[in-house]
Amino acid sequence: MTLTVLNVAYPLAPVGPDAVGGAEQVLSMLDRALVGAGHRSIVVGCRGSSASGTLVETPSENGVLDEAAKSRAQQAHRAAIAAARASWPIDVVHLHGIDFDAYLPSDGPTLVTLHLPLDWYRAEALRPTRDDLWLHAVSAAQQQTAPPDARLAAPIPNGVDIDALNLLQPKRDFALVLSRICPEKGIHLALDAAKQAGVPLVIGGKVYSYETHTQYFRDEVQPRLDGRRRFLGPLGFTAKRRFLNAARCLIIPSLAAETSSLVAMEALACGTPVVAFPNGALPDVIEHGKTGFLVDTIDEMAQAIVAASSLDAETCRAEARRRFSLERMISSYMNAYQALARLGTDAGHLAATP
């Protein structure tokens, strides 16, 4: 069954292979996989996005990302989704944004991937009332945090392109952070730990124009930067791969309940151990003392940064190959698309029956 799938990105973040956010990267991988399998892929994303299939572009917001900007972006997404559904015979709509319910189509087979902590979504949005609207988490740990009345399908765990990520190159003596720059990601804690450990730190990431994000960067991150602790800005896939393979460890100082941590999986695929606080799904991704260290304090983080070079790179790669297969993730999404598309076909047959 050849499908036409409409993937819809979060309205305020560009999507594509070089995107910073995990949700945007997953969408890009699905878009590429759909085209590679001979399906039609259509992507709704803001200006600056790229797609393997057909891109339906919406305007980008260039100023402060406040409620007014969000409202304009959501309105543009609603119009783009309606236009795409009018232009192509869409079999499945797949939504990825935290605000998906602001532009959710009122009918038709629809899949929603909940990429972020479930308590960040409106509670009502987690209780779909249609049989052709499926919501799912990206890990078992995230699923366990669902409220009792939530209606979620089985999780579809994330995966990463292990072969594309891995480079054979020597390790260098620096730690790495790859993240959005915002308070809940705890970047300042990684800076303090790396300084205490006496290890250089490289930070790759994007400061989105939310007031709280820019203030956090100005007040907490920028003053901690120096010759041995550098902020490089957003890294595209090629640069990210190079840094991930060369780093002595990846640090994830997140204070939020990470739902899956695509970047931790990417690091392990590159043979790079991960040092992280044990928040959300991270204890399920990292095996303490084998593929990284789970820590509770800045002191423990500093000690783990030093100890990371004692962990075996090939063990990290082997665990990534065994557990974080991109093919497994793609197959699960394709199965969900096919099942939802059949629901739509069956509903259409019923509607046409006199």
Image (spheres, rainbow, N blue to C red):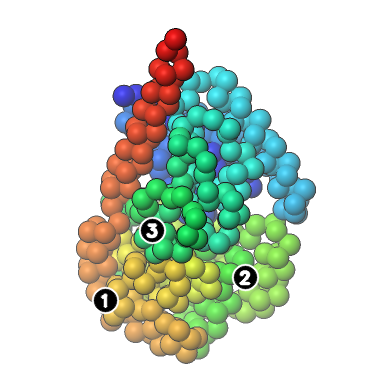
Is the residue marked by circle 3 packed among few (<14), some (14-19), or many (20+) residues within 10 Å? many
| Residue type highlighted by circle 1 | Lys
Query: Which residue position is annotated with label 1?
Result: 290
Select label 1 or label 3 by which is in front. Answer: 3
Q: Earlier in the sequence, mark 2 or mark 1?
A: 2
Does 38 sit left or right of 11 as displayed?
A: left
Give the image quarter of residue 312: bottom left
Query: Which residue position is annotated with label 3?
Result: 139
| Residue type highlighted by circle 3 | Ser
Q: Which mark is residue 121?
A: none
| Residue type highlighted by circle 2 | Pro
Which quarter of the rendered picture does the C terminus lie within?
top left
Residue 287 pos. (x, y %): 30, 73
Q: Residue at x 46, y 64 (%)?
A: 145
Query: Which residue position is annotated with label 2?
Result: 183
Residue 233 pos. (x, y %): 58, 61
